[in-house]
Amino acid sequence: MSRRVLNGFAWSAGGSLVSVVVLLGYTAATARLVEPASFGRYALACTASTLFGYVANAGLATCLLRADRLTRPLVRAASTVGAATGLGCAAAIQVVALVLAPFADAETVRLVQLLGVQLLVQPLGGALLAALRRAGRARQAALLDTAGQALGCATGLVLLAAGWSPWGLAAAAPVASLTVLAGVVLSGALRSLPGGPPVPARELLGQSGFFAGYGIVQSATNNAPLWCAAALFGPAATGWFSRASLATGIPLTALAQGLQRAAAPELAEARARNGGRLPRRAAHDLLCATSGAGFLGFGAVAATGPDWLLVLLGPGWEGAARLLPALALGAACALLCSTGNSLDQIRRAPGASVASQAAVIAGTVVLLALAAATGSLTVLALASTAPAFGHALQLRHWSAGAVLAAGPLLRAHAVHAVLGLALFAAGRGVHSLWTLPGQPLARACLSTAAVLACAAACLPLRRRIPAVRAVLTRGASAATPPHQEPVCASASPAR
């Protein structure tokens, strides 16, 4: 990877890490101000606003990140489309909320209406933030994104503490988007972009329409277990499910998102220079690093997460803690499939993305049917592992099309999975020696110490871990010469 990618990854990962801390603190505080049943209704309302959000965003951020060349007309067209689709979807979701009123409780309907307000600014803010990242301004993008998260969470907490429960939950997202939008506009950071031919809005919608449609299907598939939890187990169980999903999704996606955001623009440029072919080694290393982050993260989160979740959320959330290991495994599988889809979209292979998502849908349906038959919330949580079917199909397609060699990646996945299981066994196994009932903080510290001890024992073998080896050979370590493949060297001068 080039210095630009590594610098972008460092800022993206650093910003994501701060966001993780902010969101976990926000989750801990709101869990003490909002009842689990209200959290469940809020989670259901979020799924509705998310579906409309994909339409409003129109795949603009993805289109900008993966554009071969970023120009002022392209950003201007994306801003125009984002403002128009945001306004239309914000109005549409209000109508849908009224239609749902006879079938849902009043609290859920009101939350859907409040969450719909964020669509007025979210598409435009997201597009401008993606343009900053694509322009190589990773530092500014990370700072604005983190500031928006912090200010949004602070606003929500103030409203909740003032007695606006659960309505204050709906304030965080629009405040965060407004902060990003104001920061980008006031800074004038995108005025220095090169000019170019006009980009009609119709052309941009044609390019980004696939990303939006794909995102809607993906979101519906990912949210299907939550909907089933509401239908089969009630609002309280839905609240447990949503909080456990958030606790696993936040830390495991932060690192991989940072890597994808940093690498996607460079991979798009490299593909354009290489005659439309994706550089094999760079793609392999990206997947290998994501595999390490996912499976090792799964082990650490599944081992220590149940205990720390009870420390964060307090009493009454034991049901969420029991679901966390299964959801952590699902998050690891989702990271791999998501990164694979990102690569397929960069290499302009929409058919491959559709096929892998179809495999995920099929796996989800089978696991949901099994959960309904057994009446088990834990089995329902295991439905989150369905992206493993999609990633298996990705590996097959890449191998058959000479895009990537599946064998080395499978071996890397196996090594990372074994190490993740070792961390999980260390963290949960220590409780068989010391149970410490009624002491969640002591249990959390004990499981964390066991995981750290296991990780320390693996340090002498770190250069044999595929993810570490991939990062080192791409030039992340001064002690190891960078790989000579000109994959991610930017054609534009460093800023």
Image (cartoon, helix red, strand yellow):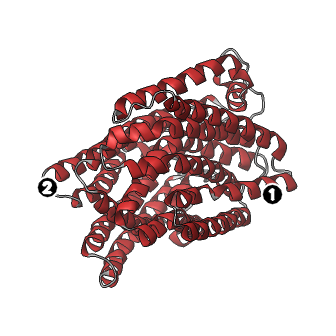
Q: Residues within 10 Å of mark 1 (few under 14, many from 20)?
A: some
Q: Amino acid at mark 1?
A: His
Q: Are marks 1 and 2 in contact (CB under 8 Å)?
A: no
Nearer-the-camera pick, 413 or 472: 413
Question: Residue 124's quadrant in the figure?
Answer: bottom left
Where is residue 94? Give x, y as percent: 31, 76
Where is residue 475? Give x, y as percent: 68, 25
Which mark lies nearer to you, 1 or 2? 2
User: Can you say whether 351 is above or below 261 in the image?
Assistant: below
Q: Which residue is mark 1?
A: 397
| Lateral position of residue 359 relative to residue 302, left or right | right
Nearer-the-camera pick, 142 or 171: 171
Q: Earlier in the sequence, mark 1 or mark 2?
A: 2
Residue 98 visible in image: yes
Nearer-the-camera pick, 289 or 187: 289
Nearer-the-camera pick, 389 or 342: 389
| Lateral position of residue 358 relative to residue 28, left or right | right
Residue 120 visible in image: no
Q: Residues within 10 Å of mark 2 (few under 14, many from 20)?
A: few
Q: Residue at x 31, y 57 (%)?
A: 36
Spatial CA distance of label 1 from label 2 is: 53 Å
Disc ID at residue 414: none
Q: Residue at x 60, y 46 (%)?
A: 332
Q: Secondary structure at mark 1?
A: helix
Question: Residue 163's quadrant in the figure?
Answer: bottom left
Q: Secondary structure at mark 2?
A: loop
Q: Which residue is mark 2?
A: 163
Q: Residue at x 18, y 48 (%)?
A: 158
Where is residue 405? Give x, y as percent: 83, 45
Where is residue 303? Give x, y as percent: 52, 36
Q: Amino acid at mark 2?
A: Gly
Farthest residue, direction left? 162
